[in-house]
């Protein structure tokens, strides 16, 4: 085993500069020399010192992820899948990942510390860090930044989001097309961009179908099983109960399905159910019975792409060229049907 660049260079009878440049992919090193150096490093189990490598290349070969602990991000299965996707791309590209939890009011100091350390090449900001007036400025720091989700203040920042407005327009229009007239919305947090977009899509579809919006059939909050259960139970107790629910997550839909069963109703004979699913690996839509009709969006794929975008930003690609909004297809399964007459 060789522990230093100097020892590896002496073993190969090459200069340290040539060996360093070969290991870090500099184009001026010939292909045969680069291959010889890489093979020797692998054979001798040489691992470059990260600090020395950063000084030599100007790159940390690492991505930072900043998130708020107040939002309990790591408890959410969608965030677990997002991090899995980021990790897969990072592993494929030989990069490390630094998780950086931060408390409310400390975001600025955290960014300053992370950027100043030189430990990462780009920073991924998890929602809702760009969605509050206090932290929206993080998009403008002089450092490669990528946001997960559409920034609510429309900042000029690289970001990946899904077409939440189009998705919930699609879901509500589909239910209206089946003949449902009492369509309930169990939304996520409407202080955030995704929640605002989903509500707008739902309301637009109702208006186009000639249906009046009813505040009693709209609820918003954290996307949890309990929130879905409580909101659906209250709506099913109304005189004009809903005949369909459009849910902001699989967990919310699972809570709603319990409330439907407790009310002595069945899916889809009495109540139809559509969920935005994020294709969460731990809670597949096929796990429900009947299988859920979903607005399909893979958060794991989004994580992979976000990592690629962060790498591209670090390489100098302008933020305006890295703004993506993914379509959300509707997949019809057994949880939806025309309402009973």
Image: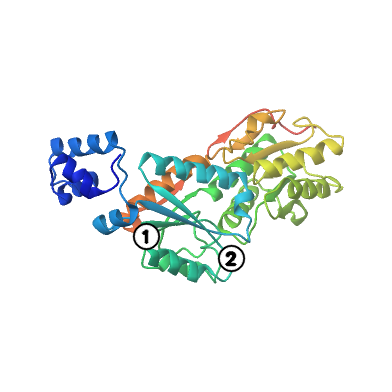
Residue at 35% over, 58% down: 320
* Residue 6, horizontal then vertical, whole percent: 21, 49
Specify whether 157 is left or right of 70. left
Up the image or down, 309 lies above or below 133; here it is: above
Up the image or down, 129 lies above or below 256; here it is: below
Screen quadrant of the N terminus: top left
Residue at 34% over, 53% down: 50
C-alpha gap between disc 2 and disc 1? 22 Å
Question: Is tag 2's residue or tag 1's residue first in the polypeptide sequence?
Answer: 2
Specify whether 157 is left or right of 66. left
Find residue 220 and name its label. Answer: none
Residue 121 position by quadrant: bottom left
Specify whether 71 is left or right of 4. right
* Residue 263, horizontal then vertical, whole percent: 86, 39
Screen quadrant of the C terminus: top right
Q: What is the crowding at mark 2: few (fewer than 14 residues within 10 Å), some, or many (at least 20)?
A: few
* Residue 176, horizontal then vertical, whole percent: 67, 40
Q: Please say whether residue 317 is visible from this viewpoint.
A: no
Q: Mark 1 = which residue?
A: 144
Q: Nearer the viewer, residue 329 or 78?
A: 78
Q: Please say whether residue 144 is visible from this viewpoint.
A: yes
* Residue 155, horizontal then vertical, whole percent: 44, 64
Q: Mark 2 = which residue?
A: 103
- Coloring scheme used: rainbow
């Amino acid at each position: 085993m060789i522990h230093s660049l100097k020892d590896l260079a002496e073993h190969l009878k090459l200069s340290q500069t040539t060996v360093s440049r070969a290991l870090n992919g500099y184009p001026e090193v010939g292909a045969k020399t680069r291959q010889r150096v890489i093979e020797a490093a692998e054979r001798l189990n040489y691992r470059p010192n990260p600090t020395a490598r950063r000084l030599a290349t100007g790159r940390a070969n690492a991505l930072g992820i900043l998130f708020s602990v107040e939002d309990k991000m790591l408890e959410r299965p969608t965030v677990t899948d997002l991090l899995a996707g980021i990790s897969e791309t990072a592993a494929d590209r030989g990069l490390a990942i630094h998780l950086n939890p931060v408390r409310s009011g400390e975001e600025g100091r955290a960014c300053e510390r992370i950027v100043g350390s030189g430990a990462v090449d780009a920073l991924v900001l998890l929602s809702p860090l760009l969605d509050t007036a206090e932290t929206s400025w993080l998009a403008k720091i002089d450092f490669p930044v990528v946001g997960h989700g559409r920034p609510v203040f429309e900042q000029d920042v690289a970001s990946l989001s899904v077409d939440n407005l189009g998705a919930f327009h699609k879901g509500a229009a589909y239910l209206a097309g089946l003949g449902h007239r009492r369509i309930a919305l169990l939304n996520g947090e409407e202080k955030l961009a995704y929640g605002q977009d989903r509500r707008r899509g739902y309301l637009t579809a109702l208006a186009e179908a000639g249906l009046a919006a009813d505040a009693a059939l709209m609820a918003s909050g954290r996307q949890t099983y309990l929130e879905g259960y409580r909101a659906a139970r209250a709506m099913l107790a109304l005189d004009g109960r809903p005949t369909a629910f459009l849910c902001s997550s699989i967990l919310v839909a699972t809570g709603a399905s319990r409330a439907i069963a407790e009310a002595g109703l069945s899916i889809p004979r009495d109540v139809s159910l559509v969920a935005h699913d994020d294709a969460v690996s731990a809670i597949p839509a096929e796990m429900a019975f009947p299988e859920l009709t979903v607005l399909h969006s893979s958060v794991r794929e989004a994580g992979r792409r976000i990592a690629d975008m962060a790498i591209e930003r670090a390489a100098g690609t302008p933020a305006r060229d890295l703004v993506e909004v993914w379509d959300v297809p509707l997949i019809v399964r057994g949880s939806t049907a025309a309402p009973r007459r």
